[in-house]
Amino acid sequence: MPEAAGKGERMENGEGFFSVDGGTCVKCGACVRDCAFKALKVGDGGMPEMAAPDKCMRCQHCLAICPVGAVSVDGRAAGDCIDAKGAELPTPRSVINWMSLRRSVRQYRDQDVDPAALDAILSALACSPTGCNAHELTFTCFRTRAAMVRLRKAFIEAVAAPRERMLPRWLAVPAIRMRKGGPDMFFRGAPGLLIVSADPSKPSVATPREDVAIACSNFELLANAHGIATCWCGFLNLVQAEVPWLLDGIAGIPRDHAFNAILFGLPAVRYPRGVARSAQARIVSYDD
């Protein structure tokens, strides 16, 4: 058992990834009570300590809930985090407005997205929630028009490769037209594409399909906040089912990985208003 920390000392336990500043901790026990899997306990002198490192999910709730910022996890301290007090947050109305005005954009400018904005968005995606706090997502991003040209070429080659059975008409016809210089029905001429994938074989990955969908939703939200339009690329999932080696060949993503993809770029069209869909929601309520 680690010795109790004195004033100004930092007590480390839990294999070194959990530590408490003994001079700052007020011994309120908030971190212990909020630990969903009971990895923490109140130790000697009232200080929190890591009782079961194997149960810790590295969710950082103990770091987030500490009222005085005494807790550190994996080398991250309170000073590395956004302070909730005074933080700018969206209002309920602004969120409703965004949901109503959001559109799947299929017309893009022939222009690359600002790389600094894209970097900021991709970095923020680390905050996307994942089942059991796995955080085992891979973000494969084709960031420029040049990268998308190479992607489209590799895509056509993969679809045209010899196979045991014929492609379905919905895939073969637009692929042939695209190969001949016709319209791009798969990627809509977008200057960028993000593929979020997860390896379902990893023991820590409990909900791979849900994890990648949530991350793509967060990307869509952040992209729109930067003036970047998006469109979910569900075609890629359908094509992968017909051409299992597709993503491995064009993006190095193994065929058994769960994934979702989303197109992005600066919009070439403006929608003056949202749409009215409230009547389309089927709501079942239980009040008692």
Image: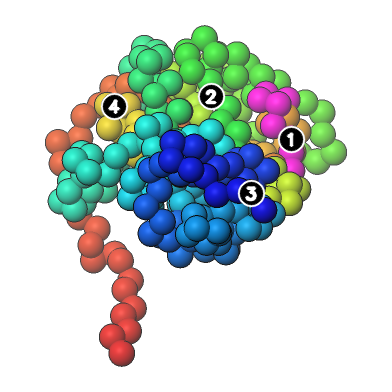
Which amino acid type corresponds to the residue marked 3 in the rendered image?
Answer: Pro
Q: Residues within 10 Å of mark 2 (few under 14, many from 20)?
A: some
* Residue that carries the numbered disc 3 in the rendered image: 2
- Cα–Cα gap, marks 3 and 1: 44 Å
Which amino acid type corresponds to the residue marked 4 in the rendered image?
Answer: His
Q: Residues within 10 Å of mark 1 (few under 14, many from 20)?
A: some
Q: Is 278 on the left-hand or right-hand side of 250? A: left
- Cα–Cα gap, marks 2 and 1: 16 Å
Q: Is 81 on the left-hand or right-hand side of 76? A: left
Q: Residues within 10 Å of mark 4 (few under 14, many from 20)?
A: some
- Residue appearing at x 35%, y 20% in the figure: 117
Looking at the image, which is closer to me, 164 or 134?
A: 134
Q: Name, please, the residue furthest toward the front.
A: 6
Inspect the magenta stretch and tell me whether residue 46 lies in it.
no
Inspect the magenta stretch and tell me whether residue 253 lies in it.
yes
Task: Say whether marks 2 and 1 touch (CB < 8 Å).
Answer: no
Q: Which residues are magenta?
A: 249-256
* Residue that carries the numbered disc 1 in the rendered image: 254
Q: What number is the disc on residue 186?
A: none
Looking at the image, which is closer to me, 75 or 273?
A: 75
Residue 38 point in image, percent of width and height: 57, 64
Which of the marked residues, 3 or 1, is nearer the chain's N terminus?
3
Which of the marked residues, 4 or 3, is nearer the chain's N terminus?
3
Q: Secondary structure at mark 3?
A: loop
- Cα–Cα gap, marks 2 and 3: 45 Å
Residue 182 point in image, percent of width and height: 51, 20
Q: Secondary structure at mark 2?
A: strand
Q: Is residue 114 above or below residue 136?
A: above
* Residue that carries the numbered disc 2 in the rendered image: 141
Magenta stretch, main secondary structure, is loop
- Residue appearing at x 17%, y 48% in the figure: 91
Q: What number is the disc on residue 226?
A: 4
